[in-house]
Image (cartoon, helix red, strand yellow):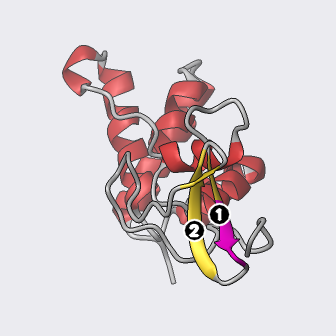
Amino acid sequence: MPLPPACLSAQRCIDEFVRGGGDADLIAATLDGLLELDETQLGPAEAAAELAARHIADCPHCRPWHDARDPVRAAWRARTARYCCAAMFEAVNEPRARPTFSFALFRNEDPCWRIDGQWSFARYCPWCGKLLPERAFEPGSAGD
């Protein structure tokens, strides 16, 4: 099935922006949903690319194109999508993060989220407020 015209236009805009020397890191961050720019503060080319990147980031038809551009970032996006938010991903995966979160089974039976190694039985994410799962975010993690 052919892509909708809006998808083709957005993809072409991103390709032309990067080929023309545009900031590829800015576009990558926008495509990954990590950055949203105020287009009133950008030049016309940057504003058009930022709008195109927002379309691509939210469009399921554009996902294969987006993933093919950078398979490493595609794997990272798939991994972080398992978490309630980026801050929780960092708290679980970055040992230097403060606080750190980890999942364990209390007495080998009750699901428990630990904060900085202490039994806390946290139920909600302190950053986004979503209910925490009763299992680790990623299969094969400690306690899963």
Q: Residue at x 50, y 73 (%)?
A: 133
Q: Residue at x 76, y 53 (%)?
A: 71
Res 90 quadrant in image: top right
Kindly identify the amino acid type of the residue bearing the numbered disc 1.
Phe
Q: Is residue 105 magenta?
A: yes
Start and end of the magenta stretch? 103-107
40 sits left or right of 130 in the view:
left
Res. 112 mark: 2
Q: Considering only vertical position in the picture, is 85 above or below 104?
A: above
Q: Considering only vertical position in the picture, is 80 above or below 110?
A: above
Q: Position of residue 126 (x, y in %)?
A: 38, 48
In the displayed image of the protein, which residue is found farthest to the front?
107
Magenta segment main secondary structure = strand
Looking at the rendered structure, the secondary structure element under dot 2 is strand
74 sits left or right of 84 in the view:
right
Residue topped by disc 1: 103
Between 128 and 78, which is closer to the camera in this rendering?
Answer: 128
